[in-house]
Image: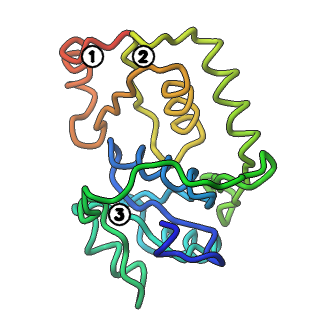
Amino acid sequence: IVQRSGARSQHVAVFASDGAHIIPAIIGILKAGKVFVLLDPGHPQTRNFQLLNHAEATLVITDAENSENAFRLCGNEEPLIIQAIPPSISVENLDLAISPDAPACIVYTSGSTGEPKGVLVSQRTLLVWALVFGHGTGNTPSDRVCTVAAHTSAHFLLSILRTLLNGALACPFQFREDGPKRLAAWLHDEQITVY
């Protein structure tokens, strides 16, 4: 991310389906000291284009499933496809001093009253939200936590971060693909302890 986006490129969009690919993308962006914005491939392309421009994102990270739409969304820029990242790439933490007051992400409202509005959330605020939410639920490393919220929502972010900060396993449920009928069986099969 640092090499692709350079020093001036602070905002990175994640354009991927609900699921496990989003989690390492978010963590990688935060570790690189960049700001992430989550886009939903299920939303109209015009909305995603509007959010991408508003966030001034200079890099789009996507998964193979959504790479064609991401390429159209990016215009002349090529998106970074998660599955194309070589396994040999270093996973060591970067030696970066990131201020707690540095921005971490932009969360957008639904836009029900007009244009969506972006809220810039700091590293400190994101951490406090996750810790407060995490301590309130009492997650432990033995927990398997189900996430069903839309991945563009603040609730999804809190759920993922509180789960990982408490050492628990985050288990995203593919609600769009599997639907509500499959949920009960999935909870049982995956041995989910927190829903």
In this rendering, the answer to whether 115 lies above or below 16 is below
Tell which circle, 3 or 1, labels the residue nearer the N-terminal end. 3
Dots 1, 2 in contact, CB < 8 A: yes
Rendered image: mark on residue 62 = 3
Alpha-carbon span between mark 1 and mark 2: 8 Å
From the image, state whether disc 3 or disc 2 is nearer to you: 3
Q: Secondary structure at mark 2?
A: loop
Q: Which residue is mark 1?
A: 187
Specify whether 128 is left or right of 176. right
Tell me the amino acid under the disc marked 1.
Leu
Alpha-carbon span between mark 3 and mark 2: 27 Å
Tell which circle, 1 or 2, labels the residue nearer the N-terminal end. 1
Q: Which residue is mark 2?
A: 195
Q: Secondary structure at mark 1?
A: helix
Tell me the amino acid under the disc marked 2.
Tyr
Tell me the amino acid under the disc marked 3.
Thr
